[in-house]
Image: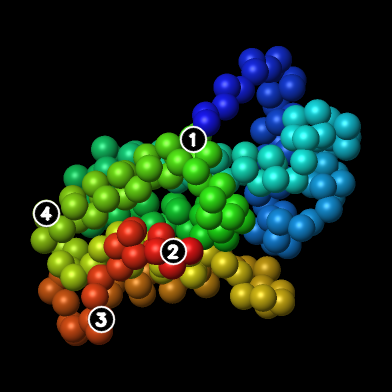
Amino acid sequence: MSRTEPRLRADALRNRERIVAAAREMFVEHGPDIPLDEVARRAKVGNATLYRHFTDRRELVRRVTLHVTHRVADEAAAALAEEADGFEALSRFVHAAVAERIGALCPLLAGEAWEDGELSAARERLELAVEALMESAKSCGRLRADIEIGDLMVVLTQLTRPLPSSGCLDFDSFVHRHLQLFLDGLQSPARSELPGSAATLEDLRQRR
């Protein structure tokens, strides 16, 4: 079921936002098992403040995932509304989604957790926005016809997971470089025939 958030005072809201931002960074860097004391330290709040907002790790992971999903959906909607060319809108969105590390964060929740009403609604909003972007890119003739949303989401997921124990401090510069290579490969006319069939969202859900 969807949860109703209590109205917070301005200072409490700022603390909550700082905790979520710090947790997002640390989950990407170290994974979801990072000590919550370390999250509080990076957010510059006390441990008691963190636990007042988030009763346990699962609730914090849930909130971070929800936050990132909404931010990426906002990016998709803005790109579609503001870019005249459908493929340019798709490219803008993909770079923004990578910057948010959506692929590194969304798998933090177990598959059944997406049955939570609020998370499910956020995911559906994102999926519809991305589908609209892809339709726009295909309509303008620049996106190859044998690509589906599942293909896009698989690549975003892979590119936004830092290599284990890589120690790479300049990960963004490599990610966006490789992402641009991928986007070039999406453009029509296609220069090769892809093996297998396009991946749909239903395909991805069946593999969970």
Q: Which residue is mark 4?
A: 139
Helix, strand, or loop for circle 1?
Answer: helix
Q: Is 40 placed left or right of 96 in the picture? A: right
User: Mark 4 to mark 2: distance in Å?
Assistant: 22 Å
Q: Amino acid at mark 3?
A: Gly
User: Mark 3 to mark 4: distance in Å?
Assistant: 23 Å
Dot 4: few (<14), some (14–19), or many (≥20) neighbours within 10 Å?
some
Q: Dots 4 and 2: beta carbons under 8 Å?
A: no
With respect to residue 48, does 200 lie above or below?
A: below
Q: Amino acid at mark 2?
A: Leu
Q: Position of residue 102 (x, y in %)?
A: 51, 55
Between 57 and 133, the one lying in front of the other is 57
Q: Position of residue 72 (x, y in %)?
A: 45, 45
Helix, strand, or loop for circle 4?
Answer: helix
Q: Earlier in the sequence, mark 4 or mark 2?
A: 4
User: Mark 2 to mark 1: distance in Å?
Assistant: 24 Å
With respect to residue 12, does 127 lie above or below?
A: below
Q: Is 153 placed left or right of 173 in the picture? A: left
With respect to residue 88, does 45 lie above or below?
A: above
Q: Which residue is mark 2?
A: 156
Between 28 and 183, the one lying in front of the other is 28
Q: Which disc number belongs to residue 104?
A: none
User: Mark 1 to mark 4: distance in Å?
Assistant: 33 Å
Q: Is 138 placed left or right of 165 in the picture? A: left
Q: Which residue is mark 3?
A: 196
With respect to residue 62, does 165 lie above or below?
A: below
Helix, strand, or loop for circle 2?
Answer: helix
Dot 3: few (<14), some (14–19), or many (≥20) neighbours within 10 Å?
few
